[in-house]
Image (tube, rainbow, N blue to C red):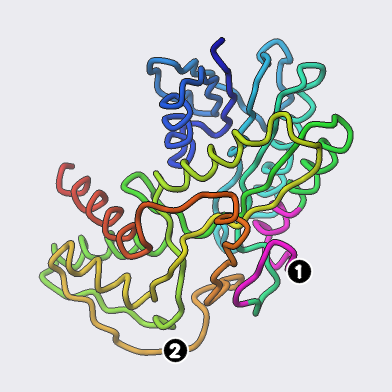
Amino acid sequence: MTQRALVTGAAGSIGEAVVGELVDRGFEVDAWDLVEPRDRPGVTPVGVDLRQPVDPALVRDYRLVVHLASVTENRDDRSSLLDHLHSLAMTAHLLDALGERVPGAVVTTSSQLVYEAGTQHPDERAPVAATTGFAAAKIASEAFLEAYGQRSGVPTAVFRLANIVGPATRRGVVHDFVRRAGEAAAAGDAVKITGSTHHRRSFLSLADCASALVDLSDALPGSPAGRRVFNVANLDSVSIADVADVVAAVTGVDFVLERHSDELAWRGDAGTVLPDTARLTAAGWRPRASSREAVRQAAAGLWASRAGR
């Protein structure tokens, strides 16, 4: 019997990767997004605005519900609290819509940015803090999912993501450096960077992220009810200076550190945060690409897409 899954936020970069991973594993997938996801074999794309209550008739019997829909802008100077309230509404509307069609498991993505500032290697029990509207919405959505699980008896999980990168990602330091490399190449100049380039990040490829999410989710149906939390990150890290070196090698554009500063790039920036991945690896999952290789793959794909414009 074919198993069915629901993915919200299915038109986003992570959503596309998760849908593809589920289809590859034999799932039929209902793909929901405000922008209707692309049609492909094994996928039923549906335009759904989760900021509004959902028609329960759209909900079917699901083995897995993977909730990815949210506002992804994490900087307060580029988003409002109302934007992030929409993220929480998306979670509430989805959980209410599930109603009597109780799924095998419900999971959602959160972020390493929920951890209290200054925690260098947080495990899943580390304190969280709403330092930005983005973090506040993620913490609240985690709590709503826990309440749903308590009420319904459905096993749930929260995946706190590190930096997820790939040719389809349009946010973050890799995308920013590739964009700036393109501008510098057009001007015949180098990319001049300032700031705290010594801070380190864990970078995970889109493919590895999708693999981790589906592996961990597919193990939940039939397990005891309760919330699980996983840090989803690579097992290694690279510095921002390393990212610049990789992008320079991919693009052929020089990167020059114009001025060093220990100041964080923006309010709410976590600096160096390398999430503890012991719980992830104990579940039997391992990434295929290192942080450096994930950055290289993303930069190469982004650079090629620029050239093809």
Q: Earlier in the sequence, mark 2 or mark 1?
A: 1
Amino acid type at mark 2: Ser
- Does residue 64 lie above or below 144 as drawn? above
The residue segment tinted magenta is 120-139
Looking at this view, is 233 or 167 the one in front?
Answer: 233
- Quadrant of the frame with the C terminus: top left
Can residue 86 be seen here? The reply is: yes
Q: Provide the residue designation for mark 2.
A: 261
Residue in view at x 44 percent, y 89 percent: 261
Q: Is residue 125 magenta?
A: yes
- Quadrant of the frame with the N terminus: top right
Q: Is mark 1 on a helix, strand or loop?
A: loop
* Residue 234 drawn at (x, y percent): 46, 60
Looking at this view, is 261 or 1 the one in front?
Answer: 1
Residue in view at x 65 percent, y 54 percent: 80
Q: In this view, does 128 lie to the left or right of 196?
A: right
Residue in view at x 85 percent, y 41 percent: 147
* Residue 62 drawn at (x, y percent): 65, 20
Q: Is residue 148 left or right of residue 263?
A: right
